[in-house]
Amino acid sequence: MSQSLTLSHPNGKLAGSIKLPASKSEANRALIIAALSGQESQLHNLSEANDTQLLQRLLQSDAETIDAADAGTVMRFLTAYYAITGQQKTLTGTDRMCQRPIKILVEALRELGASIEYVGEEGYPPLKINDFNGSGQKRLKVRSDISSQYISALLMIAPLLPEGLELELEGKIGSRPYIEMTLSLMKHFGVDADFSGNMITVKPQKYKSAAFTVESDWSAASYWYSLVALAQEADVTLLGLKEKSFQGDRAAVDIMYRLGVYTEFAKDGVRLLKKEHERHISLDFSDCPDLAQTVVALCAAIGVTVDITGLESLRIKETDRIQALQIEVLSLNASLQEITPGIFRLKPDIMQKKPLSFRTYQDHRMAMAFAPVGLLQPVEIQEPGVVRKSYPRFWEDLEKVGFDVKYKE
């Protein structure tokens, strides 16, 4: 992997059409559901993201030890999948993955009848998954303010449980659109569920085989919104996005409208054009936490003050994303501080023309969030290969719209 790359743009003008990668959130759910159905389903436009390619390989693997690497959805979805299918597996991952909590999911699966042991530290991977003997219990309470992936993992196996599942979500529901995406995909494959208030009910039933085409990734689109906002002139079309989407990160349309980007929907995707941006905004990322890094980096670069809530889940991602942002925006002469518990303020100042180098913390979103600053002046991105996790062609796509990309070993 290259140690760094330098990004610059000759004139700050962007034009062209980009085929975005497919949504790994949709793809990974579809893969698990298709595997649980036990039937052949036609899945089209599966994501080229490393996480999705990894999940495909692991679902076909007979190995006793399964390495989920740095993929959170893969770790959490496979924990539930192996448990309900009674497969004896040891499930592990990178050092960082083994620092990411999984206790809430493991305890819930144990209540349902799964036999799961911790190989190392209590509450964290690696896990040893043994057999499954239905406990007869169908009602669970699960905290819903940490990671929606625990909830999605439980929901996808719910139809196969002898009694089905009544899942009560405790506390503020974070990333609600991701839970709704899971339920929508379950319905596409023949399973009905009821989501009323804080209760989700899934009766015992069978998945059916179905064809499904994965939509382009709205998270990936967010970096292009940021690029358009920072460009001198822009007319960019992103292919494969839908106006009516399962993905919570479609919220980028409304957020980025306030930050200087107008969205025009067409049959084949969206067209992005520049407009005036606001100077001071407040945003809640509870339903779309993956957009937070993009927005923080953009606001720091264009001089927008933003008050932010809904960042609770960012502490347990690929890195502590709040801390990483607090460090990196300093290079842009901005500060990100927690002004009261749970409320952060990004306060920009005049950007200084000085050499800029951004660390990525083994986090794909850090690399792509700060890359658009290269429209204003040359920037160095350290460990750029991290983008393979969700958008392997990102640097090549930047070259298509005129960026000069120089790799350094």
Image (spheres, rainbow, N blue to C red):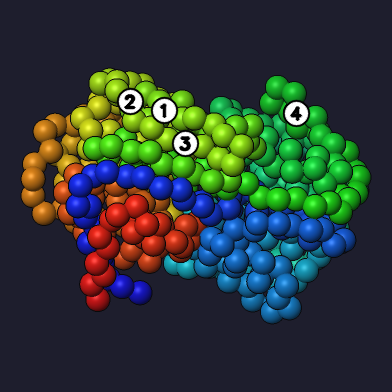
Tell me if residue 100 comes above or below residue 176 in the rendering. below
- Residue 274 left/right relative to 404: right
The label on residue 271 is 3
Which amino acid type is marked by label 4?
Phe
Q: Amino acid at mark 1?
A: Tyr
Q: Marks 4 and 3, how far apart in space?
A: 34 Å
Give, as a three-letter code, the residue at label 2.
Lys
* Within-10-Å neighbours for mark 4: few <14, some 14–19, many 20+: some
**Location of mark 2 (residue):** 275
Say which of 394 and 207 sits in front: 394
Q: What residue is drawn where x is 31% and y is 35%?
A: 229
Label 1 sits on residue: 262
Res 195 label: 4
Contact, mark 2 vs mark 1 (Cβ under 8 Å): yes
What is the quadrant of the N terminus in the image?
A: bottom left
**Residue 160 in view (yes/no):** no
Residue 260 quadrant: top left
Q: Is residue 83 above or below residue 152?
A: below
